[in-house]
């Protein structure tokens, strides 16, 4: 018996519909885990390690109202985050900020990490337009490592860090960004 | 020009067969004769280009709009299967010689990793419509290049004196490997 | 055919990669490390067995004329299931296997078994066939990726087994190595089977 076109199409449609249904259910069930994985993958592991050693992800800060309040009073603050390790434990807080003092070619954008003991865990440059080979040296560990371990609740003076030789503007701009983060941390996050 | 560089990269530097391994089944199966190989290559260019256009439109137009990205695999492969059916019917009418020569390998274009692979890569690399077009044509041209080159070489290999065990797919794969070394040389090419 | 023979058939006599020589795209691309080879092998076992079971269970209800599109939908569904599960639960492996996970749907082995076996046999036999072919695939993947990882990296499953002084044969990890090593493997299998039949 030759099957009618309608019957053939109908069976195919049924198989397709049931498959789509199963997949829709599974997609829903795994949606959150997948989104989490994708977000983790988009973070540069080098930055994560430089800012908060041992962290695998920066999550949004729990108190979003506070974040909004800080951002509206301090327009150089871009975001406040918490750094978590692979088991989901919070390692510390991270402030994402711009400089308050212009560098040679504009603002620099940084992550500054703070340990629960109120010390700076590390800093990392996200964006800058400083001169290649001169101001850009502020992104190198030779310069950024100086900030590790410094007290995260008091402003860091210019004499407390060695600027990059020949890159005074960039160094000042960098420092201002860190101090902005310190200000936010000491006033709101300690 | 970014598009020219994309074409050359997908054509040679990241050659679909010798560097990405997509499409090896028909590559090994159809390359015994240069003319058939060329015919297959051209059919593949046609299918891949059309498939890329259609899957691209359906993905961004329907799947993403309705949040149904998880149906991508099913939808894409059905589009490709339908497309190959049409190409089969078309060839049967207008190029029956080629249709006969390609035989079973024509419907097998459906399961050619290259077609689905290119369609999916267009989405993964987040290409614009124009870029995905260039990528598709470049990649499939690379397939044509690879299969024709290989057919030429296999012609000669058939006359070689080989141990019994190596005859057939074994020597084909080894030969493909040696040709792959040549293409590996392009990987430093930056345009 | 006795049940155990169905299984053995998939692993040895009709081994999908080493004897039938189908579904080779993933084999060549993925086998740069043993972990990846095993991961892909297990994924294929899952899709192959799953689709064999469903297709066999539905074989009396699927009309002959539309059986290929029906197979394709079912296989694609299982591929997507594995894709979602890996994206959520085995993310590192998911990233390593990349586009080759959705490409399982065009792995000729699965469609071939659906057509050649599952559509004509009962569910239990089809399950065993799926498992057998899948394990055969896994075995070939393990062979190939072990060789490539040891030669090309000096490690196995990430553990260093060749001394640090060993200069890795970079080519083993790169595309030419894949072709050549697989070719030699198949040649070796041919040699063994010819000796057995002689």
Image: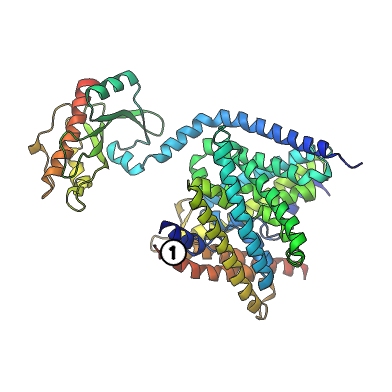
Residue visible at 39% across and 60% down in the picture: C164
Displayed quadrant of residue B65: top right
The residue at 55%/58% (across/down) is: B137
Q: Would residue A190 be visible to someone looking at this image?
A: no
The tally of labels here is: 1
B3 is higher (above) or lower (below) than C89: below
Q: Is residue A112 left or right of residue C30?
A: left
Q: Residues within 10 Å of mark 1 (few under 14, many from 20)?
A: some
Residue extending furthest toward the right: A1
Where is C92 relative to A83, above or below? below
Instruction: Provide the residue designation for mark 1.
Output: B187
> Left or right: A31 with respect to B4?
right
* Rendering coords of residue A109 (x, y %): 25, 38
Q: Secondary structure at mark 1?
A: helix
Residue A164 on image: x %, y %:
13, 47
Q: Nearer the viewer, residue A82 or C90?
A: A82
Most extreme residue toward the top is A65
- Front residue of B77 and A49: B77
- Left or right: C53 with respect to B18? right
Residue C160 % position (x, y): 44, 55
Chain of the residue on which disc 1 is drawn: B
In this rendered view, identify the residue nearer to me: A82 or A42: A42
The N terminus of chain B: image quadrant: bottom left
The quadrant holding residue A144 is top left
Q: Residue at x 57, y 41 (%)?
A: B59
From where the camera sits, is residue A9 visible?
Answer: yes
């Amino acid at each position: 018996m030759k099957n009618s076109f309608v019957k053939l199409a109908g069976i195919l449609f049924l198989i397709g519909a049931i498959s789509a249904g199963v997949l829709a259910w599974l997609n829903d069930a795994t949606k959150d885990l997948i989104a989490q994985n994708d977000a983790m993958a988009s973070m540069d592991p080098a930055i994560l390690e430089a800012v908060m050693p041992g962290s695998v992800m920066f999550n949004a800060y729990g108190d979003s109202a506070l974040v909004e309040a800080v951002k509206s009073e301090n327009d150089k603050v871009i975001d406040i985050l918490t750094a978590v390790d692979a088991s989901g434990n919070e390692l510390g807080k991270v402030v994402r900020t711009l400089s308050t003092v212009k560098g040679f070619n504009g603002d620099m954008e940084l992550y500054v990490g703070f340990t629960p003991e109120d010390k700076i865990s590390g800093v990392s440059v996200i964006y800058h337009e400083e001169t290649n080979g001169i101001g850009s040296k502020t992104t190198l560990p030779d310069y950024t490592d100086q900030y590790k371990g410094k007290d995260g609740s008091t402003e860091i003076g210019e004499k407390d860090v060695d600027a990059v030789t020949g890159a005074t503007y960039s160094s000042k701009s960098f420092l201002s960004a860190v101090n902005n983060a310190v200000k936010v941390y000491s006033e709101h996050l300690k | 020009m970014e598009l020219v560089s994309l074409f050359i990269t997908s054509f040679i530097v990241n050659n679909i067969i010798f560097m990405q391994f997509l499409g090896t089944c028909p590559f090994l199966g159809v390359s015994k004769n240069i003319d058939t190989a060329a015919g297959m290559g051209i059919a593949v260019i046609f299918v891949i280009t059309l498939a890329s256009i259609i899957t691209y439109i359906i993905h961004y137009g329907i799947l993403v709009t309705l949040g149904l990205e998880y149906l991508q695999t099913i939808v894409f492969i059905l589009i490709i299967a339908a497309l190959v059916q049409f190409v089969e019917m078309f060839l049967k009418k207008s190029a029956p010689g080629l249709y006969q020569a390609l035989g079973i390998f024509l419907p097998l274009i459906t399961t050619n990793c290259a077609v689905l692979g290119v369609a999916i890569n267009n989405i993964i690399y987040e290409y614009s419509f124009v870029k995905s077009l260039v990528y598709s044509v470049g990649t499939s041209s690379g397939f044509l290049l690879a299969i024709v080159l290989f057919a030429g070489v296999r012609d000669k290999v058939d006359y070689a004196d080989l141990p019994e065990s190596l005859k057939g797919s074994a020597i084909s794969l080894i030969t493909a490997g040696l040709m792959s070394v040549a293409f590996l040389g392009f990987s430093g090419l930056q345009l | 055919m006795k049940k155990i023979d169905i299984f053995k058939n998939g692993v040895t006599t009709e081994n999908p990669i080493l004897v039938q020589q189908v579904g080779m795209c993933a084999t060549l691309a993925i086998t740069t490390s043993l972990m990846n080879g095993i991961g892909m092998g297990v994924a294929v076992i899952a899709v192959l067995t799953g689709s064999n079971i469903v297709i066999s269970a539905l074989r009396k209800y699927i009309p002959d004329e539309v059986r290929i599109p029906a197979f394709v939908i079912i296989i694609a569904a299982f591929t997507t299931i594995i894709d979602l599960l890996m994206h959520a639960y085995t993310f590192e492996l998911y990233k390593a296997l990349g586009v080759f996970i959705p490409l399982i749907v065009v792995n000729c082995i699965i469609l071939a078994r659906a057509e050649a076996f599952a559509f004509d046999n009962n569910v239990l036999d089809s399950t065993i066939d799926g498992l057998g072919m899948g394990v055969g695939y896994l075995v070939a993947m393990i062979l190939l990726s072990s060789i490539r990882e040891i030669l090309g990296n000096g490690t196995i499953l990430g553990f260093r087994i060749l001394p640090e002084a060993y200069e890795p044969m970079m080519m083993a990890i790169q595309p030419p190595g894949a072709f050549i090593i697989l070719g030699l493997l198949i040649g070796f299998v041919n040699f063994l089977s010819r000796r057995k039949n002689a």
